[in-house]
Image (cartoon, grey):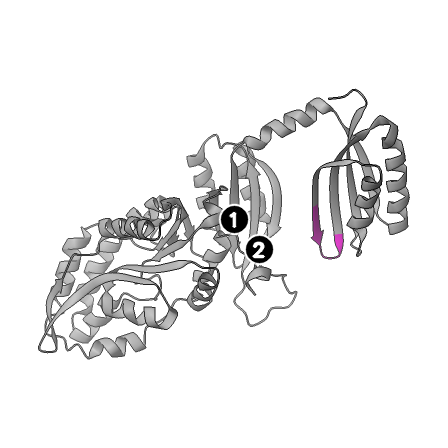
Amino acid sequence: MEPNVEIIQINIAGEDKPGMTSSLTAILARYDAFILDIGQANIHRSLTLGILFKTTAEKSGFIMKELLFKASELGVMIRFTPINPDDYNAWVSRQGKNRYIVTLLGKQVTARHIAVATSAVCEQGLNIDAIKRLTGRMPLEEDDRVPKSCIELSVRGTPEDRDLMHERFMELSETGVDVSFQKDDIYRRSRRLICFDMDSTLIRTEVIDELADRAGVGSQVREITERAMRGEIDFRESFTQRVALLKGLDVSVMQDIAENLPITEGLERLMTILKRVGYKTAILSGGFTYFGNYLKQLYGFDYVYANELEVEDGRLTGRYTGELVDGRRKAELLRLLCQFENINIAQSIAVGDGANDLPMLNLAGLGIAFHAKPKVKATAQQSISTTGLDGILYFLGLKDSWIE
């Protein structure tokens, strides 16, 4: 670097006013200063602006004098910091380090939550580059809306012990906030496909339990269901046993059950936004095609893959037809859909709650355990337990101000 070159950082703080940034940068432009970096943040009506620029020793004094006068005229504070060229070059060399996004999501994100999360990040040798709020501004008075709060941290570096950091984040989830940790790369910014489990994910029930109640075998089927969801028995075996118990049930009950399905909070908002921004959506369910197609018609899913119940003379036979959609098949279907849509598997998202969802959750670029059993939550990459399905939008980095 030339001997007469100077690098100066200016930091401005004060009340935000229209034209402030343009008037300050106009001074730099007048003296042909080269801006190396710039960043601005606003909280309430307060502005913080930082500019790092390069100039010559002959011009630096004039620039700082004019900036000082302009800051006084605008009623803001300004601070000048000379930067050593070696320090600047060392800072530039660090930009190639891994970047990650840490998302804190809950009904309320408190100072304690932020303190614990940032402490876990710091312990891993990661540096926080930026913090922003994704949810809308918080009113002082409670309103009728379901509260949501989301804070996103952009961090840089390489975690020293990811397992330990994951444990710290899991501890936070027990206090009412979900924490997502994702690599901030080109794939995170270009997700294109999202695949959902259906039962206890898109709907707040297990359809096979609803059918079992109508057949008078509810308690028997629920016991098998719980064992399967906890991963205690093989899904194929449990599914075969449960379907066999439905033998003789009139198929007319399926329409009544479909029309009264308890839809999970946030599904309509989530699907509206996903379709608006061009996502392909799929239901990959160990449940039944009839109910998947009903949801497809209601919300516009692009694909449905589930199990087909065999029917004879208007009644269930206690058997199913075709290949069973179990955990292995869900992962296989996810991979096939990525190939069909001509996208990288890293651009996919999978959402589910049960042990049979783990293969697709671990295969997808972003796997989210949604209100899942403890074993599934502990194994999955990410989890949401504090909000509805539209909480997924914040894990994608979308802001309320963009969405609404």
Residue 172 in view here: no
Is 7 one of the magenta-colored residues? Answer: no
* Residue indicated by mark 1: 103
Mark number displayed over residue 134? 2
Residue 7 coordinates in the image, percent (x, y): 76, 29
Q: Are marks 2 and 1 in contact (CB under 8 Å)?
A: yes
- How far apart are labels 2 and 1 at the CA level? 9 Å
Residue 53 coordinates in the image, percent (x, y): 75, 35
Q: Horizontal placement of 86 versus 105: left or right?
A: right
* Crowding near the residue tagged with mark 2, few <14, some 14–19, many ≥20 C-alpha atoms within 10 Å: many
Q: Horizontal placement of 65 versus 106: left or right?
A: right
Main SS category, magenta section:
strand
Q: Which of 82 and 221 is in front in this view?
A: 82
Provide the residue span drawn in magenta.
40-46
**Amino acid type of disc 1?**
Thr
Q: Horizontal placement of 24 versus 365: left or right?
A: right
Image quarter (top left, top right, bottom left or bottom right) of the C terminus: bottom right
